[in-house]
Amino acid sequence: MSHKHLNLFTDGGSRGNPGPGACGYIIKTDDGKIIDSGNKYLGECTNNQAEYQGLILGLSKVKEMNTEALSVFMDSELIIKQLLREYKVKDKILATLFVKAWNLGLDFKKTDFKHVARELNKEADAEVNKALDQQNLA
């Protein structure tokens, strides 16, 4: 099913910073219905690297859904300000991840990046923790 507009919530984190990291995403329709979610264990990384990986993972999934417009919500103020071009990306690893995310965002007619409080991103955060907790069980 195709949607004109979707909402993507992404998150990433590492336990230790740097440490074992993971990312997650939630894709919702405008009426709040979750249509997809997922997570990925990343191994050793920083919080910011994990945040970008969550964004890239989520954008890749939304791209498969043939939507025209997308609103992206993240609780990482740094990443959002970099995507809005308010902050420069100085770290080389983050710069590579920024370019990947930026290029994926260009696949949509309209992409909005919005910072949200952590409390409004709990579902994506739960995906991150699910991936980290599953890794600890292995």
Image: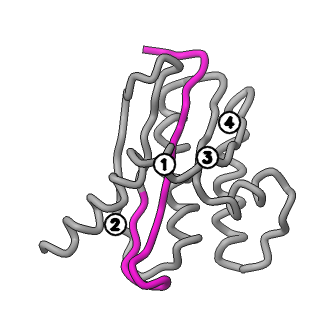
Q: Which mark is residue 41?
A: 2
| Front label number (2 vs 3) | 3
Mark closer to the observer (2, 1): 1
Is 128 situated left or right of 103 in this image?
left
Q: What amino acid type is highlighted by mark number 1?
A: Glu
80 relative position to 14: left or right: right
Q: Of tags 4 and 1, which is closer to the observer? A: 1
Q: Is residue 43 left or right of residue 120?
A: left
Q: Secondary structure at mark 4?
A: loop
According to the picture, the residue beneath numbered tag 1 turns out to be 119
Callout 4 crowding tier (Cα within 10 Å): few <14, some 14–19, many ≥20: some
Residue 37: name its quadrant.
top left
Secondary structure beneath dot 2 equals strand
Q: Earlier in the sequence, mark 4 or mark 1?
A: 4
Q: CA distance from mark 4 to mark 1?
A: 29 Å
Which label sits in the foreground, 3 or 4?
3
Give the structural element (helix, strand or loop) at label 1.
helix
Q: Amino acid at mark 3?
A: Val
Quadrant including the N terminus: top left
Residue contact between numbered discs 3 and 1, judged by CB atoms under 8 Å: no
Label 3 packing within 10 angstroms: few (<14), some (14-19), many (20+): some
Which residue, given by chain and number where applicable, does mark 3 sit on?
A: 116
Dot placed on the residue nearer the N-terminal end, 2 or 1: 2
Report the Cα–Cα distance between label 4 and label 2. 25 Å
The magenta-colored residue range is: 1-23
Of callouts 4 and 2, the N-terminal one: 2
Q: Under tag 3, what secondary structure?
A: loop
Dominant secondary structure of the residues highlighted in magenta in the image? strand
Q: Position of residue 62 (x, y in %)?
A: 51, 35
